[in-house]
């Protein structure tokens, strides 16, 4: 009874009053990013050079692509732990297609490129594997009604196994130059290609979530699945679709990763899920679903990249880096929970 | 004889509503007492206060001759008051014995004396005349057996008073007989029992005395032997007719838009064999408001959800404008022009983290699409503005979060969501629950206006004055069945109450 009766807010005055907490909650990731960058700039002048900044962006672009996909999943209150394994499997698929088959796996040098397939077929193979993997998991979640955590934990193991099986003989390396350019090249001699791909897809995802009917449905299903169903939305297909989108980005990320390393191996992508989920959550997307933006995810991704880069420049050991990242993840979720409880009371 | 329990001048206020206003209850040792009242009369609040789950704002409780303050449910149990709620509080994956002794396991230090626990449980169940294995897992028991475990737990705590909230609502008639036999047995041993119930025949059969609450006040109490069912009903509803809820006379000569025939559904989440809907049938005409009255749990919401495709049903036909339609999901229902405003706004209708504008247009994206996939926000804003004016939705801005609107304005947004779809049939389930009196009148007027535009409205409400004010025709439901149909002008609260509470079809 008491939850239903709510005193009407006098809307006009609520609008005028500056809500400092709301402002902070909304822009916390960006503010934090600026503070951290300022801090590093003071202690380490090398940090603010364009070269270093593009370097940071290049490092985060693959995490960033995955985080864009993960934002869709977490917006529906889901989670995908399988992406690291899926990246490995899809990367191997891209590599094998690029090389024109597994028999050419160890061939290196220009003479051998005759057998290879063009880069876009490699990309298609990686994305195809990713989408198929995502669809499989999405169907398991919506049709078998197994929680996403469990399904994708299974996927994490199964896709890793598939990758190991596929790459029984070890890594595949030595790709044709056009493929490698996608990972290592620069546009205008300045901007790394993976950064362009990351930002382009981030903008596409932002437009999808913000301006399309589908985007509305993602927020609605994440915010209140029962109300979404009673409003005539097809909740199951929306949930399935976000895992397909996640799979698409895992495939795309895998393709770019193989190109950047000029190699694909079955142990690639290990532990990616953690960094990616952290980026999304730090960017303000709620693990409870229904709240979050791509903009936040991009900031969150860059924030983690900047932190790692700055800590490296300051000669902090990688072990301590891991501890710091871990603490930040917990604090970000604590902040999210706190903001949510405040919203309930307010 | 000294009374066992005397609650007097109990007051309790929740934000926006005075739940109890000088309520009281008095009973003797070894008595079976009926606590009666309409939905929302304050029965639940009173027993929550008695069981220590809530604290009264003022008033006194005397138990066993002492004035007591129950600070928590544990405190109440310690004093000998056990409460058995409709939703049992058993741990389903534990044994009967563990549930009976939960939190009070016999044993030495850290270790549980299983043998003692089992033998004491067996002793109690035997006293109840039951054949239950103490080591059986609770999950596998029937509803009636689980209720017995709750009673066994109450006995093991040496309770002197057992409060049972709607104990018979989920039981078959044979199980009810068994429960009553046990209740008489306990009474013979000097225990007292409070039954909170809607079933007046059962009250006449088992109870010694009664207390009736209305609008949070004590309006009558006495011996069952001195009163009739009609007398109880008069006490339950006997308020002056509120002129505030005015009926609006309209001519209804439309064709039948919605016809439901033979709707059946067996089984709910708790019990696979429960009869949820049994041969439910009715029809609604264009421009008509059909009121659906019934007590909580009568199957009204289940009927609405079945027609709307939100829950599956076993058999039955839904006919729209003379053509049978097959509805398996809310999408099917919407495609056929049926809308549903669900009973629980926050859980089932609103997206609290989203803006008013986005909430309002959620069901009608198709009308505001541009370039196939994009939402045309200009058209959307125009839609919001149109309904803001039509329904007089008070808000600072369409971009405001819906959570920050009052309940009445939230409900108007939910109504607007469906009006934007131009439905043929709109089912509204408790359309004015939890909103203040002024907004209630506004919602009533909106329902009249909707009917005037030709929509066939099905209005479910637990408030009889509301049903009488808005309906052109009323059906009553009880235990998943339609128990009667009556024209508004022939109906009174007393007539409706007897149609809702008695098994036999009246009139």
Image (tube, rainbow, N blue to C red):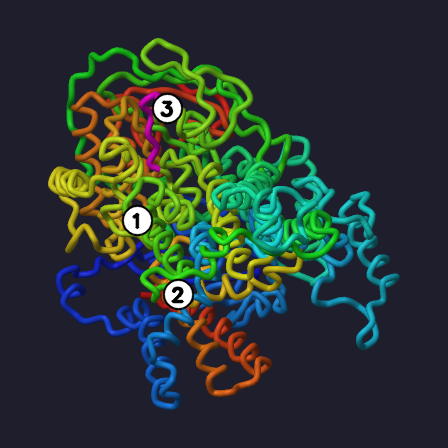
Q: Secondary structure at mark 2?
A: loop
Residue at numbered disc 3: B475
Q: Chain of mark 2?
A: A
Measured Cα–Cα span from mark 3 to mark 1: 50 Å
Based on the displayed image, in which of its 4 quarters is residue B36 positioned? top left
Residue in the foreground of this view, choosing between A273 and A113:
A113
Tell me residue A200's x, y (percent). Answer: 34, 53
Residue at numbered disc 2: A283
Residue A207's disc number: 1
Tell me residue B380's x, y (percent). Answer: 19, 40
A306 in relation to B458, above or below: below
Q: Residue furthest front?
A: A111
Residue B166 seen anywhere in this rendered image of the structure: no
Tell me residue A303's x, y (percent). Answer: 40, 72
Q: Are marks 2 and 1 on the same chain?
A: yes
Residue in the foreground of this view, choosing between B116 and B33:
B116
Q: Chain of mark 3?
A: B
């Amino acid at each position: 009874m008491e939850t239903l009766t709510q005193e009407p807010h006098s809307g006009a005055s609520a609008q005028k009053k500056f809500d400092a907490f709301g402002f902070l909650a909304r822009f916390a990731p960006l503010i934090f990013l600026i503070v951290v960058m300022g801090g590093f700039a003071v202690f380490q002048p090398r940090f603010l050079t364009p070269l270093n900044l593009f370097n940071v962006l290049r490092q985060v672009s693959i995490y960033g692509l995955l985080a864009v996909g993960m934002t869709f999943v977490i917006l529906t209150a889901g989670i995908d732990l399988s992406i690291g394994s899926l990246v490995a499997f899809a990367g191997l698929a891209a590599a094998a297609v690029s090389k024109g088959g597994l028999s050419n796996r160890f061939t290196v040098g220009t003479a051998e490129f005759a057998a290879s397939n063009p880069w876009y077929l490699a990309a298609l193979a990686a994305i195809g594997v990713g989408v198929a993997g995502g669809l499989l998991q999405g169907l398991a979640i919506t049709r078998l009604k197994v929680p996403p955590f469990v399904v994708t934990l299974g996927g994490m193991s199964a896709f890793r196994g598939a990758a190991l099986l596929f790459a029984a003989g070890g890594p595949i390396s030595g790709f044709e130059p056009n493929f490698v350019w996608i990972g290592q090249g620069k546009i205008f001699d300045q901007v790394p290609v993976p950064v362009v791909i990351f930002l382009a897809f981030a903008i596409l995802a932002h437009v999808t979530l913000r301006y399309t009917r589908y985007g509305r449905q993602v927020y609605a299903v994440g915010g209140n699945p029962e109300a979404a169903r009673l409003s005539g939305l097809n909740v199951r297909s929306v949930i399935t679709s976000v895992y397909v989108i996640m799979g698409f980005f895992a495939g795309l990320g895998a393709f770019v990763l193989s190109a950047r390393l000029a190699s694909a191996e079955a142990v690639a992508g290990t532990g990616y899920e953690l960094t990616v989920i952290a980026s999304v959550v730090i960017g303000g997307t709620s693990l409870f679903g229904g709240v979050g933006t791509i903009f936040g995810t991009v900031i969150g991704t860059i924030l983690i990249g900047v932190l790692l880069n700055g800590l490296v420049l300051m000669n902090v050991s990688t072990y301590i880096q891991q501890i710091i990242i871990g603490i930040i993840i917990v604090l970000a979720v604590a902040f999210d929970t706190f903001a949510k409880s405040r919203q309930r009371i307010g | 004889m000294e009374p066992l329990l005397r609650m007097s001048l109990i007051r309790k206020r929740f934000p926006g509503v005075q739940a109890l206003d000088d309520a009281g209850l008095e009973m003797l040792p070894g008595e079976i007492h009926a606590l009666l009242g309409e939905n929302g009369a304050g029965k639940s609040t009173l027993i929550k206060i008695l069981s220590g789950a809530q604290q009264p704002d003022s008033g006194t409780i005397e138990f066993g001759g002492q004035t007591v303050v129950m600070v928590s449910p544990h405190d109440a149990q310690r004093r000998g008051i056990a409460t058995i709620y409709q939703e049992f509080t058993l741990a389903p994956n534990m044994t009967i014995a563990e549930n009976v002794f939960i939190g009070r396991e016999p044993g030495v230090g850290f270790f549980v004396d299983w043998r003692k626990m089992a033998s004491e449980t067996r002793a109690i169940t035997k006293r109840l005349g039951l054949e239950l294995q103490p080591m059986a897992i609770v999950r596998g028991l029937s509803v009636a057996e689980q209720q017995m475990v709750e009673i066994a737990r109450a006995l093991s705590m040496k309770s002197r008073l057992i409060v049972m909230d709607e104990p018979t609502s989920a039981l078959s008639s044979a199980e009810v007989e068994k429960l009553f036999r046990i209740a008489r047995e306990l009474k013979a041993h000097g225990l007292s029992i409070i039954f909170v119930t809607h079933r007046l025949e059962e009250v006449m059969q088992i109870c010694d005395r009664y207390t009736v609450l209305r609008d949070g006040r004590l309006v009558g109490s006495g011996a069952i032997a001195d009163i009739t069912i009609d007398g109880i009903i008069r006490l339950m509803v006997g308020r002056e007719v509120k002129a505030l809820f005015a009926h609006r006379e309209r001519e209804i000569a439309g064709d039948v838009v919605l016809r439901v025939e033979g709707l059946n559904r067996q089984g709910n989440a708790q019990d696979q064999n429960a009869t949820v809907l049994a041969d439910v049938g009715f029809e609604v005409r264009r421009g008509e408001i059909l009121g659906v009255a019934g007590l909580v749990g009568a199957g009204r919401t289940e009927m609405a959800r079945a027609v709307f495709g939100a829950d599956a049903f076993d058999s039955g036909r839904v006919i729209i404008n003379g053509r049978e339609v097959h509805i398996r999901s809310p999408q099917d229902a919407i495609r056929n022009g049926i809308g549903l405003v669900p009973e629980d706004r926050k859980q089932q209708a609103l997206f609290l983290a989203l803006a008013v504008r986005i909430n309002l247009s959620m069901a009608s994206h198709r009308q505001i699409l541009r370039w196939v996939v994009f939402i045309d926000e200009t058209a959307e804003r125009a839609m919001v503005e149109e309904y803001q004016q039509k329904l007089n939705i008070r808000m600072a801005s369409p971009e405001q979060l819906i959570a920050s609107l009052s309940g009445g304005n939230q409900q108007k947004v939910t109504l607007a969501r469906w009006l934007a779809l131009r439905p043929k049939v709109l089912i509204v389930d408790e359309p004015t629950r939890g909103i203040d009196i002024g907004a209630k009148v506004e919602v009533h007027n909106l329902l009249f206006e909707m009917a005037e535009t030709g929509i066939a409205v099905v209005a479910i409400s637990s408030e009889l004055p509301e049903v009488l004010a808005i309906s052109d025709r009323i059906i009553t439901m009880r235990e998943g069945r339609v128990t009667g149909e009556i024209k508004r002008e022939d109906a009174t609260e007393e007539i409706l109450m007897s149609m809702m509470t008695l098994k036999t079809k009246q009139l």
